[in-house]
Image (spheres, rainbow, N blue to C red):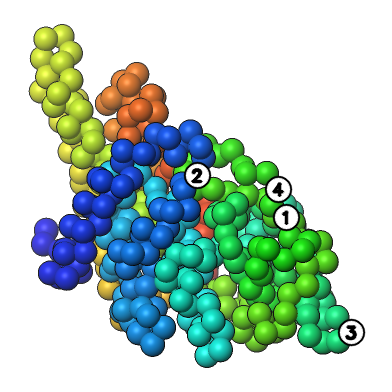
Amino acid sequence: MKRTVFNEDHEAYRSTLRRFIEAEVVPHYDQWLTDGLVPKDLYRKLAALGMFGIEAPEEHGGAGIDSFTYAAIECEETARAGVVLGSSGVHVALCLPYLLQLGTPEQLKAWMPGFISGETMYAIAMTEPGTGSDLSGMTTHARLDESGTHYVLNGAKTFITGGYQADRIIVCARTAPADPTDRRFGISMLVVDTTLPGFSVGRKLDKLGLRVSDTAELSFTDVRVPVDHLLGEEHRAFHYLRDNLPKERLAIAYGAYAQAKAAVDFTQAYVTDRTVFGKSLATFQNTKFELAACRAEVDAAQAVADRALEALDAGELTPAEAASAKLFCTEVATRVIDRCLQLHGGYGYMTEYPVARLYADSRVNRIFGGTSEVMKMIIAKDMGL
């Protein structure tokens, strides 16, 4: 079916990004997997392509394009090559919207140049050791000092993507006790410079997948954060997080669809070349039927992802629709990638084959950004159940 979400400008960007990945990422990827992160220089190279400034305002050096389409192309091209570009997705897809929506003119003037150039990489810290989906239960807290010029931040965060290499982190912390009638009240966002005394990075976590995207534990001990690093209004962070979740969940959905499509492409190439019992593996009926079934699921996921993308760009994507897209695309990816790995036989279990990396990388899609179970709760509530 003909797609309508991309135009000539998008395809030119796709070609540029594809050439960059082939020249600057693929040759070094095995080493990055061993290291468990990408070199920070990669981020400056990605910035030079314009990746970090596409959605940033022109007055701050960006392109001023308010569209998810370019991020969608990045999902497709990285999956096509079987690679991950470190934590660049968090930098752009998660952190940039909060900066643009909530930042004051003074904050944006100070922060945007480094953001766009890749000199200052951002992460966002929400999850704590005892709080995952229930963000209202967080205990990391920040109180104003006696002078009223600084917040004093204390607490710990975990599973923070990009946290090991980040230069600034958007930290969600309690600035007031939870209201008994509204546990979501009292959470604020602080932009924390990682060079501040009292900030420390704990373990770089050893994950099943996404191994070149560094994930870390963070701790804050009497970290003094200037009050002018408050992002948005005090006590309202939970509402900001909720408002940005549809875009975050679409990004996960699109990435999952792209991974499923890539798995089918990798597998079709493998079974065509692989000989079993003197014949190409692609000639067996089971192979044809399995890949045909996978292709049908990928086509459906692509249609859902594209429709959600168009709704987001039009300002019409609802939380329930985003949850539905995430649930469907991530579940499709799980089924498709598993069936594609099976067609590789024992080689599918070897990490030198991209389908094995896709299998590991895609598993977290049903967890972060809200688990599949949370997605079902959102959809059921929208149905009036």
Q: Taking 167 as reference, is 33 left or right?
A: left
| Number of other residues with Cα within 10 Å of mark 4, as a class: few under 14, some 14 to 19, many 20 or more | some
Q: Are marks 2 and 1 in contact (CB under 8 Å)?
A: no
How far apart in space, not on screen, are marks 3 and 2 (Cα)? Answer: 41 Å
How far apart in space, not on screen, are marks 4 and 3 (Cα)? Answer: 30 Å
How far apart in space, not on screen, are marks 4 and 2 (Cα)? Answer: 15 Å
| Number of other residues with Cα within 10 Å of mark 3, as a class: few under 14, some 14 to 19, many 20 or more | few
| Number of other residues with Cα within 10 Å of mark 2, as a class: few under 14, some 14 to 19, many 20 or more | many
Q: Name the residue under label 3.
A: 146
Residue drawn where x is 73% and y is 75% of the image? 225
Q: Do the residues labelled 1 and 4 touch (CB within 8 Å)?
A: yes
Q: What residue type is labelled 4?
A: Gly
| Residue 177 horizontal/vertical position (percent) | 82, 76
Q: Element type at marker 1?
A: strand
Question: Could you say which disc has been placed on residue 37 in the image?
Answer: 2
Q: Nearer the viewer, residue 116 or 177?
A: 116
How far apart in space, not on screen, are marks 2 and 1 (Cα)? Answer: 18 Å
* Disc on the earlier residue, 1 or 3: 3
How far apart in space, not on screen, are marks 1 and 3 (Cα)? Answer: 24 Å
Whether residue 218 is visible to the viewer of this picture, yes or no, is yes
Q: Element type at marker 2?
A: loop
Circle count: 4
Q: What residue type is labelled 2?
A: Leu
Q: Mark 4 points at which residue?
A: 202
How far apart in space, not on screen, are marks 1 and 4 (Cα)? Answer: 6 Å
Q: Mark 1 points at which residue?
A: 200
Q: What residue type is labelled 1?
A: Ser
* Disc on the earlier residue, 2 or 1: 2
